[in-house]
Each structure stands twice: as C-alpha cells, then as structure tokens.
Image (tube, grey):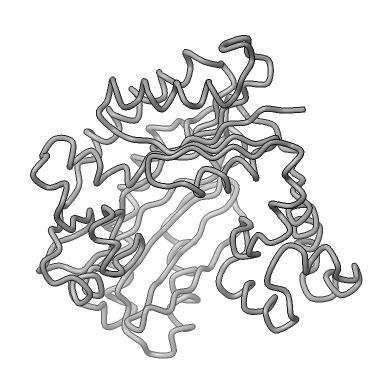
Amino acid sequence: MKKIIHIDMDCFFAAVEMRDRPDWRTIPLAIGGSRTERGVISTCNYPARVYGVRSAMPTGQALKLCPHLLLLPGNMEKYKAASLQIQAIFHRYTDKVEPLSLDEAYLDVSDSTLFSGSATRIAEDIRRVILAETGLTASAGVAPNKFLAKIASDENKPDGLFVLPPAKVDDFVKFLPLHKIPGVGKKTAERLATLGFYKCVDIQRAPLHTLVKHFGSFAETLIERSFGRDGRDVQNDYPRKSVAVEHTYTEDLPDLNAGQQSLSELLPKLRRRIERCEATAHIQKIGIKLKFADFQQTTVEKQQPELDMASLTQLLEQAWHRGQGKKVRLVGIHVGLKAQEALAQLSLEL
C-alpha cells in the first residue's frame, strides 16, 4: 500500500507578497495585471475570495466584484526562489518528489522510516518546517494514491491537513462530486449532469456501455477515479509536456494582420524559453491559442518537429476564421514536447 502526500501552498504568489508586507494580510490582494491594462488573475488571497475573486478571472471582472482590490504585477524571480526553498525541504524527507508547479508537489513516503513510517506525522512535520523556514503556510493531503492525496489536500484549506486512510476510501469517494476528478471540466460536468451523474457513486452504478458511448476512452478514467483507484507512480523526473507564451492586449486586435504582428513578437520569446529548457530536439507539435473579445477561445495544433513562422501563420489563419469576424484579446503560441529532462513550472502570464 502506497503512502502519498500532496503538498499545496496556500495562495502561493499572494502569500509570498503578504509575508514580505504583513500589512497586506487583511486586505483583498491579487496578482495579475493592473487597473489600467487588461489581464487575468493569477492568484489571490482569501480576503479577496470573500468577494468572489478567483484565479484565471479577467482582471476587469475581479475589480467589479472588489473595487478596492490591491493588484500587484507579480515577481516571478521571488516566487521561484521561494519554490526552490520549499522543494529543498521536500527532499529532506524523500527522494521521490514530483513537482506539479511552483507551489505543489507529490511525495511518495511509502518506504520512509521517518516518524516510524507515519505519513501523517511526516506531512505534519513538512508543514511545520515550511512555515518555520519560509514564513508560508501549506495544506497537505495524505492518501493511498496521487488522485486521492490531491483531493485530500483541498479538504482543510488553508493551512490544513487531511488524512484519508485506505479503510475510509470507499465511503469518501462515493459522494465525491465528479467535477473534482482531474479532466472533468465545466463542459464534461454538464454532460455528466444531463445523464444524471453528479457524484462518483453515480458512475459506480452506471452501465459501462453508457459511459463508453458518451465519453469514449475517458470512460476508463471516470470509472477508475470514481472507485478511488489510481495506479500512477510519483515521478522524480517529471517530464515537461509543453512550452508556451501568450499575451493579453490592452486593446482588442481588430484583424488578421494585427494577429500576424503579434506572432512576430511572441515567437522570439517562445524560442528563448525553449532554449532555456533545452527542448529544441523534443518538439512534436506546435499550436496557436486565441481568446476572442467575448472570452470564447480556440486552439489549433499541428504535428511537426520544428517551429517556423510559416506554419504558425497558417494555424493563426485557421484559428482567426473560427471567430467569424470577432476581435481578439489574447494570442498564444505553444509547442508540445516529447519526454525530456525538465522541471515543470507554472508560468505567470499577465
């Protein structure tokens, strides 16, 4: 039986800022853009969440919900430094660490002899040391697999610990909302609801042919997670799957020519990011993302091993035509990668 810990830092970027400015701890604060330029909220503190502000929310919408919101542009170098300090703490307890982003990671402590092999006490000590050495709080989940550990870490946020022992897994997952399963986004949740599926127990009771008919290959994941099963190992050398850059414009781009100009500005930035992670030889696909003025978005991708402007321009034209004349507020380009040695990082796009 595995012992997996999922550590998730509490509102990480905002927490770093509040640590350095204690007078900001009680006021609504968010990282992302400014009052004069458009952008999206990267993260926000809990006082801001009281007003309905959330990550990935357009900055303008956040300001309507909370007019006195303190907006900060963010400091990635400071956040990366804090993340490296936290990652170093993880490795004091086990070499089996899989970082998911700057602010969260899985730890496999199945073979650890620390605290007599108690995963609960290990998680408690990790949280204690993080607070003592960084001034930041972390929430933790302890469970028999990665899926359940990640769900558990969200149960007692912020600054909490939730332990799900094997004997209680069945009862816990039965009434777990399906939207908490990774891969079940808003649209999938709506499709599930139209079929009368809201909780994991509904999937447990559903006929296999019905699930396959409506969800194809994803039916297997739905079934496995609905029974609390997850056979994935914690990966020490977690492979980076993509590299991307994107930009949200202060004024909407009116036409395709403006979009092509955007590509010429973004492509050099993407090439620099690829060079930094030494991924050039690993490219297997390229893609374009557009977000239109009405916040609808589309992505077009193409399988190919190199990154060139001509191919990106073709993809841009396809994506632009999908908007049927709508202006564009965001342009992004990305490459998909084959397995390689690179630390997965959370990019801050403002």
| Quarter that holds the C terminus | bottom left
| Quarter that holds the N terminus | top right
Residue that lies at the very extreme toward the bottom in this rendered image = 325
Q: Is residue 122 above or below residue 347?
A: above
Count of numbered labels shown in the rendering: 0
Can residue 91 be seen here? The reply is: yes
Q: Please tell me which residue is depicted at 70% across the width and 35% down the height of the picture.
A: 144
Judge left or right: residue 196 versus residue 113.
Answer: right
Tell me residue 312's x, y (percent): 45, 62
Q: Please tell me which residue is depicted at 38% across the width and 61% down the height of the picture.
A: 332
Judge left or right: residue 222 versus residue 299.
Answer: right
Q: Is residue 325 above or below residue 92?
A: below
Can residue 280 be seen here? The reply is: no
Q: Please tell me which residue is depicted at 41% across the width and 71% down the height of the picture.
A: 290
Tell me residue 224's x, y (percent): 79, 52
Tell me residue 226's x, y (percent): 75, 57
Residue 256 position by quadrant: bottom left
Choose between 270 and 228: the one closer to the eye: 228
Choose between 1 and 248: the one closer to the eye: 1
Q: Please tell me which residue is depicted at 30% across the width and 54% down the height of the picture.
A: 43
Tell me residue 188's x, y (percent): 64, 72
Q: Is residue 84 above or below residue 197?
A: above
